[in-house]
Amino acid sequence: MNSATTPTHRTVALVGGPGSGKTTLAEALLHRAGAITRAGSVEQGSTVCDHEPEEIARGTTLGLSLAYLGWTGPDGAEHSVTLADTPGHPDFVGGVDTALSVAEVAIVVVSAVDGVTAGTRFVWSAAEAAGVPRIVVVTQEDKARADFRRVLAELRATFGEHLWPLELPLGEEQAFHGVADVLSEQALEYDETGRHREESLPPEAEAEEHRMHLDVTEEIVSHDDEQLEAYLEGNEPPAGDLERTLAREVATGEAVPVVVCSGLTGTGVDRVADLICALAPSALDLDGRIVVGEGEAGTVVAVAPSPDGELLVHVFRTVADPFVGQVSMLKVLSGVLRPSDRLRNATTGVDERIHGLFRLRGAEHLPADALRTGEVGAVAKLTGSPSSSLLWSRTSGSARPAPRPRRAPVFAVSLEPASQSDDEKLSGALARLVGEDPTLVIDRTGGATILRGLGDTHLAVAVERLARVFGVHVTTGPAPVAYRETIAGSAEAEGKLKKQSGGHGQFAVVQLRLSPLPPGQGFEFVDKVVGGAVPRTYIPAVEKGARDALATGGPQGHPVVDVRVELYDGKSHSVDSSEMAFRTAASIGVKSALAEAGTVLLEPVSTVTVTVPSELQGAVLTDLSGRRGRVSATEAADDGRARVVASVPDAELERYVLDLRSMTGGQAELVITPDRYATAPSSAKV
């Protein structure tokens, strides 16, 4: 198959709030395209996209899933589409970011019952920030309390008047039986198989549909001088010409089409596929973006989507499969990728060999002889190509994909291995887990292994995958607060080590002076020795010993920070002194000085930014005040909501993201950024 006969490909991100019907819509599209013989059910755990055990158990999408299908348009043109079904749960927004990084269009799925929700606002903003065109699909039109016109009004009030309905529902709720095509002014009546026939509009729909037809047509022709001139002369362009003009507006974001369907009954689903292929830009219409160069610096370079260009492949997600090992999802930005190709990872520097190519349809692997420019697929066992890396045919140079948004963690748990065997495997398993999901963060606080993420469900799923996929079992507990200590005043102390046990002994004496530094200064070591009382070769050992003592903890058991350690005198022995002896003596001296001066407990404080509807601002402010928060700013966000910025001790934030979602009905956006350390109150529980 050459490029001339290859179907035009589109990667379509299905995004929306929880419960909006994304996975059901994906199932309906796959069934209508003939990719599956029977549509599955989210409730029964039988859908193509929600195939992981954790998803089936919870009845919701938890990760990005790809589903390939072929589609024949009304004009007979062949298209290929990869659906990228994304989570609606706020804990798993990383899947939305990943899908948008490779999609040509975002299908914003909105429930005809629930309307515009916090999840709708989030995915809209994410797609806008990523520069991805949008098409809105209003689903669940067959459900009780469905109201397309109310939802359309909400959409336009929230996102702008450039949202234009291309369809109106014929009937609603259980009576939903067809759609009125606004451009062609035809009724599309559907049977139980999800196929339609064209009929004249019913009399009760004619007036409303014609008003909408005039509004939409005038908006479209205003963007094309030739069509506008013909329209003003009374010659209205045919529906196909209007669609082509509208497609240009969709690509630039000047217009967002709105269509309606039921994924459950299939009514309108084929029209969704037709309009995706007619209005969304294809993979060959859009340049890719990469960053060339090492480190934080680098040059953003546009990549022309040329089948004849040099081979460039974006590895956008890796998943550990318990049967085939690591599976890497990838998109070909330029050139043609074939099995047995040898490429270099421009991000990690590792040479890779492509063992076999396949397309994904949920858990199903569909063998592929090649992946051409713009196509999405997968390959197994790329050991040196993590998520967000680039493969290319060059033998040198450094490059990486355009960066995705950083989603800072807001919830944490401590991990305790269930056995010695689990302890030995934990570090490697966590590294692979973070490789799958970069929104997870691993760190160590107080000797504990801490897993951080975007919510309790996020971390619960991660722990389940640790056990199921990697065979590592852990128990979880509250994450300890990273308290610190600092010296309360200045103190002097002698550190002395003198041992004799046959042969060479151990001898070292150091005279130290400790004093506090300004907050945030960390550690300072000063050498004030004169006359060689401590030989120069042992000075670095004294500094290491001081650092050892501060890191192991002060009188209250926490690492000590913001301390100046001055070495001003000491003694040595020509035979018994050594680096280890002076290192040990320095540690003894520092601990003695800390005990004499005493320490002050410091607690971490973070900057908390909460964005909520204005009517909920008061509740958020009251709650932050009860958490010892100090509000530094309240302002209006760009979308009219309120933004609250406050400094809050970490000890008060353990469950804050969960409490905030409960308090605001899930309408709040939260960012927590570590800021500084401050003196803890005497009542602090450590």
Image (tube, rainbow, N blue to C red):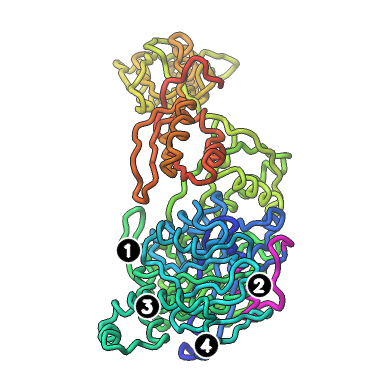
- Proximity of marks 3 and 4: CB atoms separated by less than 8 Å: no
Identified by mark 2, the residue type is Thr
Identified by mark 4, the residue type is Pro
Q: Is residue 26 at all visible to an observer of this figure?
A: no
Q: Is residue 160 at all visible to an observer of this figure?
A: yes
- Residue named by callout 2: 265
Residue nearest the viewer, comparing 539 with 544: 544
Magenta segment, prevailing SS (helix, strand or loop): loop
At 62% from the left and 66% from the top, the residue drawn is 173
At 44% from the left and 40% from the top, the residue drawn is 615
- 475 to 558, vertically: above or below: below
> Which of disc 1 and disc 2 is earlier in sequence?
2
From the image, which quarter does the C terminus lie in? top right
- Residue named by callout 4: 74
- Proximity of marks 3 and 1: CB atoms separated by less than 8 Å: no
Labels 2, 1: front one: 2
> Which of disc 2 and disc 3 is earlier in sequence?
3
The magenta stretch spans which residues? 25-45
> Which of disc 4 and disc 1 is earlier in sequence?
4
Question: Secondary structure under badge 1?
Answer: strand
- Residue named by callout 3: 214
- Residue named by callout 1: 300
Magenta stretch holds residue 618: no
At 52% from the left and 82% from the top, the residue drawn is 201
> Which of disc 1 and disc 3 is earlier in sequence?
3
Q: CA distance from mark 3 to mark 1?
A: 43 Å
- Proximity of marks 2 and 1: CB atoms separated by less than 8 Å: no
Q: CA distance from mark 4 to mark 2?
A: 21 Å
| Residue at the far front in the pictured view | 203
Residue nearest the viewer, comparing 367 with 116: 116
> Which of disc 4 and disc 3 is earlier in sequence?
4
